[in-house]
């Protein structure tokens, strides 16, 4: 049954199902807007924590504390590189170029194995010709390293993971491995975080402004739905 509301010289003439559809649409768009705004707030807090950690002085740590520290914490560790057993993380791009991220095991003085991300190297153009990932001269012995704790890169699809080969060849190329994959290849436990000393670390996720813009878009859809309802059902008396 149609409903009519007189508005001066005009009349809002509509049916119940159009009103219900508009109310549901506006409520959905509004809730999605608040959801995106909340994500933006949380992401802004994450970015602020990242910037604070990046500016903080490094704290000396032992292996037992590594897994309990927040990611992006700046730490100082002592030990030596295991340059004979390195990993090349495949499918890592920089400025549109394909390459590898170098992961080198670092044997800490307390016996903990920590993987160190020493940075990115370009793809040579040949799968059977790997880049030189030798440890720089002067870093073969005992070292003190400073860097930020990070996570292993994660693939959006499980099919993108390629565990290290089980043969005796080193360095091993691997794609988005799990911690257990690297530990199995090394034959010993590996700390969960990665120490980034040469890698270019960025704040987690997209910038918060993107979520805020999505929120405004959803709220705009809610306003548009309401305007369309009025426009399509408003007529002269």
Image (spheres, helix red, strand yellow):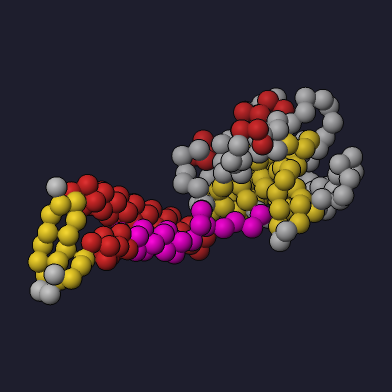
Nearer to us in this view, 142 or 214: 214
Residue in the image at 68% along x and 55% along y:
198
Residue in the image at 75% along x and 48% along y:
100
Image quadrant occupied by the C terminus: bottom left
Query: x, y (%) of residue 199?
Result: 66, 54
Number of callouts in the render?
Answer: 0
Residue in the image at 19% along x and 56% along y:
14
Residue in the image at 82% along x and 25% along y:
167
The segment highlighted magenta reads 199-222
Q: Is residue 207 left or right of residue 232?
A: right
Q: Is residue 211 magenta?
A: yes
Query: x, y (%) of residue 173?
Result: 77, 37
The kind of secondary structure the magenta stretch mainly shows is helix
When asked about the image quadrant of residue 153, the answer is top right
Q: Is residue 82 at all visible to an observer of this figure?
A: no
Q: Is residue 147 left or right of residue 42?
A: right
Q: Is residue 201 at all visible to an observer of this figure?
A: yes
Q: Is residue 172 magenta?
A: no
Nearer to us in this view, 189 or 49: 49
Q: Is residue 164 left or right of residue 137?
A: left
Q: Is residue 155 left or right of residue 127?
A: left
Q: Is residue 66 above or below residue 211?
A: above
When asked about the image quadrant of residue 220, the answer is bottom left
Nearer to us in this view, 139 or 231: 231
Outermost bottom residue: 9
Q: Is residue 46 above or below residue 142?
A: below
Query: x, y (%) of residue 123?
Result: 82, 50
């Amino acid at each position: 049954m149609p409903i009519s509301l007189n508005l001066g010289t005009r009349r809002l003439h509509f049916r119940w199902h159009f009103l219900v559809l508009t109310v549901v649409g506006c409520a959905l768009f509004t809730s999605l807007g608040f959801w995106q705004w909340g994500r933006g707030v949380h992401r802004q807090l994450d970015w602020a924590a990242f910037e604070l950690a990046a500016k903080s002085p490094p704290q000396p740590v032992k292996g037992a504390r590594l897994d309990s520290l927040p990611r992006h914490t700046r730490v100082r560790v002592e030990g030596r590189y295991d340059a004979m057993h390195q990993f090349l993380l495949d499918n890592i791009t920089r400025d549109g170029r394909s390459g590898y991220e170098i992961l080198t095991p670092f044997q800490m003085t307390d016996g903990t194995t920590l993987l160190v991300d020493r940075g990115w190297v370009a793809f040579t153009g040949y799968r059977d010709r790997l880049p030189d990932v030798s440890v720089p001269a002067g870093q073969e012995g005992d070292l003190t390293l400073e860097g930020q704790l990070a996570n292993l890169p994660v693939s959006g699809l499980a099919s993108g993971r390629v565990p290290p080969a089980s043969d005796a060849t080193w360095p091993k190329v691997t794609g988005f491995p799990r911690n257990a994959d690297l530990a199995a290849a090394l034959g010993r436990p590996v700390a969960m975080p990665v120490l980034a000393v040469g890698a270019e670390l960025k704040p987690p996720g997209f910038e918060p402004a993107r979520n805020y813009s999505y929120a405004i878009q959803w709220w705009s859809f809610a306003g548009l739905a309401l305007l369309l309802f009025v426009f399509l059902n408003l007529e002269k008396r």
